[in-house]
Image: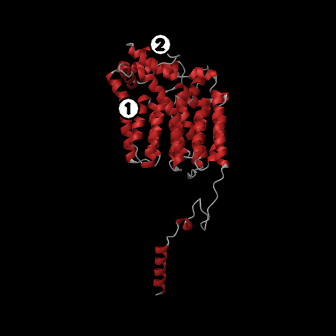
Amino acid sequence: MQVAAVIEALKKRLQQKPISCEKVLPTAAVRRGGAALRAPWPAPAALVWALAIGVFVVGAGVMLTPHERAVYWLRDLKVYSTAVSTFAAGADPYRSALARHAGGLFFTGPPFVWWLYKRVAESPLRPLVRHGLIAAGLISSAVLPLMQSRLLLGDRPERLALGAAVFFAAFSGAGFIAALAMNNGTVLYALIVAALFPAIARDRWIFFHAAVALATAFKPFYAAFWLVPLLADGISARHLAGCLAGAAAAASAYLVPALAAPALFAEWLHALYKQTLIDGLLGTNVFAAVFQWSIAPGRGLAPYEAQLALSGVLLLASLTLAHTDRPRRTAGLMLTAVFLNPRLMPYDICIAAIPLLACVAGAESALRQGIWAFLLVAGTIGPWAAEAAGFLFPCLAVLALLVAIGYPRPSAAA
């Protein structure tokens, strides 16, 4: 009888006044007993803002000199404009490589991209190509670091600002160079990162597969980004099928021209070979560093084997990352995908800046992120860093992955 009376009393009490969940489970804003906590101390956020502004200003001061602006301003855009003009004149931009158009650079897009530019050059859209590419490049350069920061560092304004500063300033100011050069790679990276949001938030990967397939049709090394769905949550049949379908679609952009137009395919390979191995535009990865080192007499170093060894280490680290926290796992896989590309150009390597920071600093402390951002930029922006970039930057990537493997932390971005 006493038990029944107690139960009846509790029912009446619940009907009169609901129990506050704040008294049962105190949140970060409520003390035990219901007393409100003070507002978070604003000093860390202000310090992160100061670090973000400082990193950006220092990077801009080092990289945006009159000489650098003159060298990189619309450098890659000239290649696309020249290709469209060449098509409009009835010539072939692959064969025009010997004329050294666009300041020594020339069109090296695969036959699928060659066909795309040819169709545009023959269409009424030709006068709009230059303006459209500039608009797409500017929007991508502005939005891409914000999306990466939101995905990997957190959504507070100071974290977004910090990520943007690192994106532009790290790796010898690669983000600034990419924004000045207007390469279509920045647009393709922006599509890939944008497609990660529905993939991670709602497990809808179809847009990601489509974005990576489109990018891979432009350059084969974008296919490395399929590591993200393959290893983010462990290999599953659904993710494997999606990656294989996307890879098959991208491969058709190379196989069809190789079979249907073998002469055109051979011209592309010749133009690519000339621009890279003959002219020495190999980027800043270990392949380029060892290639340049092995030119001297008596040095038998092999750039292909060096890049293969680095790729093996990166892939092994990626497999290990499958057991750590998800933000760092995603950052580590993106970092791996970038450095698997043996020909890293500024518009490629700037995409690795925010994942590098996320691997080292995690996502639980904005102040920690700010301090590491300053250290990483300071170590990758000086003239000495640019000279040793081919060895330094891959080593930083491997070290960041080791940190992410050895010190996993649950994300609690605040």
Number of labelled discs? Answer: 2
Distance of mark 1 from mark 2, alpha carbons?
28 Å
Q: Residue furthest front?
A: 16
Answer with left or right where residue 338 lies relative to residue 384: left
The percent position of residue 83, horizontal first and vertical second, equals 43, 18
Is residue 73 shown to the viewer in this render? yes
Q: Secondary structure at mark 1?
A: helix
Q: Which mark is residue 98?
A: 2
Q: Residues within 10 Å of mark 1 (few under 14, many from 20)?
A: some
Under circle 2, the secondary element is: helix
In the depicted structure, whether residue 381 falls above or below residue 88: below
Image position of 97 (left or right of 375):
left
Number of residues whose C-alpha sits closer than 10 Å to that of mark 2, classed few (under 14), some (14–19) or many (20 or more): few
Observer-nearest of 391 and 78: 78
The answer to whether residue 259 is above or below residue 365 is above
Name the side, left or right, on which 221 lies relative to 349.
left
- The front one of 144 and 320 is 144
Q: Position of residue 159 (x, y in %)?
A: 59, 44
Residue receiving disc 1: 251
**Amino acid residing under circle 1:** Ala
Choose the circle earlier in sequence order: 1 or 2.
Answer: 2
The residue positioned farthest toward the left in the image shown: 260
Residue 168: x percent and y percent?
Answer: 58, 33
Residue shown at the point (59%, 48%) measured from the top left: 406
